[in-house]
Image (cartoon, rainbow, N blue to C red):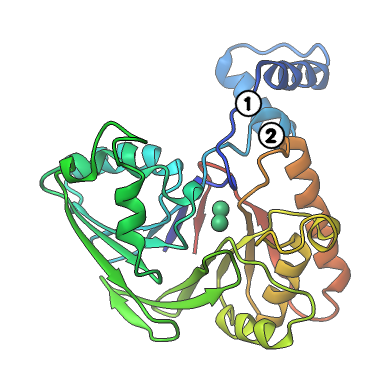
Amino acid sequence: MLVRFWGTRGSLPVAQQADQISGKVARALVAANGRRFADEAEALAFVKSDLEFSTGATFGGATSCVEIEGADEAFIVCDMGSGLREFGLNASRRCAAGHARIYHVFMSHLHWDHIMGMPFFAPAFDPGATIVVHSGHPDAEQALRRQQEEISFPVPFDWLRAKFEFITHEVDKPFPVDGLTVTLIRQHHSHDSFGYRFERDGRSVIYSTDSEHKLDDMDSDGAFEAFFEGADLVICDTMYSLGDSVSLKQDWGHSSNIVAVDLCRAGGAKRLALFHHEPTYSDRDIARMHAETVRYEELVRGDRPPLEVICSYDGLEVAI
Ligand SMILES: [Zn+2]
Ligand SMILES: [Zn+2]
């Protein structure tokens, strides 16, 4: 399986501002320290190898959208955040080269940041495309139709040409989708959210965003530890630092990097991807949180095998 991140930001899309780009260029020039480069390729190699990621690149600003490559022929997508627009353009090119025009989309929930990419999803206008929307919510179709009503958007849902199908699933009942086995878990979030476990040939990927894990809720912790068990990759809502999540932002429906590490370790997961980044965080803030999470994992590791902590960004690909 291959996991491709198209949108990793939480709550609201963000874009880099002029002064943030200028800051990156200035830091790069200081780091180059007068060094000369023969051409752009040589300079780019320096950017990739010598600069910190937060200086030479960006975590990106599109909201939740993750592709999982590994079904028999269909596209597998988690959530329709603003990252869905870029995914749709890329998928259309792959379809032109022969890829099946079948899309299975798994909705964590129906909050705006997880559906806002839908009106800009090019395959929805393709009469040869089939889009199957899988959800734990029976009101998924209503949510998608409502955001395209005239008062909010000029193109009504009924103008879309793809064939749509909506399927509501129950939790804890694995079902097959094009070669994958998929299981849902209910998560603590306003109007509920659902996490997904995707499995194939002994490999597993968990998509668990917009879920508030309470520090003192042992029953819930046990259910998630079991859900995460032995996963090759857990994509987890780590919107806040632990300090924020237990003080300022308790009951806001999101989790911390620390809780995510604890649950992954208890479940014996192999890799954790930090996800749903707080929109007010700069690239340097996100990089700092990543470094803190890696340090925390090292501190609590003991004699157990390490949990690799990666930080998702728009454009990241992870082979499973
Ligand atoms: Zn969200
Ligand atoms: Zn939400």
Q: Nearer the viewer, residue 96 or 209?
A: 209
**Residue 282 horizontal/vertical position (percent):** 73, 35
Q: Earlier in the sequence, mark 2 or mark 1?
A: 1
* Tag 2: amino acid: Ser
Give the answer, above or below, for where 129 lies relative to 104: above
Give the answer, above or below, for where 45 lies relative to 165: above
- The residue that label 2 is drawn on is 49
**Residue 258 horizontal/vertical position (percent):** 78, 65
- The residue that label 1 is drawn on is 16
Q: Residue at x 61, y 80 (%)?
A: 224
Query: In the image, which is nearer the foreground, mark 2 or mark 1?
Result: 1
Q: Nearer the viewer, residue 82 or 270?
A: 82
Tell me the element at label 1: loop
Quarter holding the N terminus?
Answer: bottom left
Q: Residue at x 61, y 51 (%)?
A: 276
Q: Residue furthest left?
A: 128
Q: Is mark 1 within 8 Å of ligand 1?
A: no
Ligand 2 is found in the corner quadrant, namely bottom right
Tell me the element at label 2: helix
Residue 35 visible somewhere in the drawing: yes
| Other residues around mark 2 within 10 Å, as few (<14) / some (14–19) / many (≥20) | few
